[in-house]
Amino acid sequence: SNPKNIFVTGLSMGGAFTLYTAIKYPEVRAIAPIAAPVFLTQKLLWLLPIVKRFITYFNAGHEIYIADKQMWNDPIILENMKRYDKLVVPCVDSLMFFLRQLKQQLHLINQPILICHGKKDRYVTPKNAPYIYEHVNSKEKKLLLLENSDHCVTLDYDKEVLFDQITNFF
């Protein structure tokens, strides 16, 4: 049997996978990528082809990409941030390759799409959102820029707005 009501959403790299899922599976009814990258602007990424020959990982620090500073003291968030303290260079290289392919295939997305992004995102530039909007082929497309949120929109000031908008869209 073929399921008829598949809706997909995801945050950050999960947002990029959301876009990819829509391309690969046209039967998906609608998508809502959140803070999805199709390009990254971190200054040192141009060094990746050289660096990957010499190092396996580098320390990413402990920056929390949430504008709501009250969340910074949440023990669950602090525990989860430990999982992001190192970046594995071959994985970053694979991600960059994936994003280049994804960016070239955005025109294959035809499903209704709600593109969500925090305006204060310091990790994945908010410029990705209008870029995705302009390059998908969807007849029904909406851009939701969340005024008060950083990268982790699902934990930030605008999370209730985000959840309501995605629920209503789906």
Image (cartoon, rainbow, N blue to C red):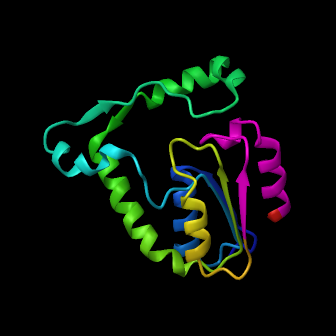
Magenta stretch: includes residue 149: yes
In screen coordinates, is 87 left or right of 152?
Answer: left
In this rendering, the answer to whether 138 lies above or below 64 is: below
Q: x, y percentage for residue 21?
A: 55, 67
In this rendering, the answer to whether 170 lies above or below 123 is: below
Foreground of the two, 3 or 131: 131
User: What residue lies at 58% left-to-right and 21% top-to-bottom?
Assistant: 78
Residue projecting furthest to the left:
54
For the N terminus, which image quadrant?
A: bottom right
Foreground of the two, 74 or 66: 66
User: What residue lies at 62% left-to-right and 70% top-to-bottom?
Assistant: 133
Q: x, y percentage for residue 2?
A: 68, 76
Q: Which residues are magenta?
A: 142-168
In this rendering, the answer to whether 144 lies above or below 75 is: below
For the C terminus, which image quadrant?
A: bottom right
User: What residue lies at 55% left-to-right and 49% top-to-bottom?
Assistant: 12
In screen coordinates, is 53 left or right of 79?
Answer: left
Q: x, y percentage for residue 134?
A: 59, 75
Q: x, y percentage for residue 54?
A: 13, 38
In this rendering, the answer to whether 13 lies above or below 58 is: below
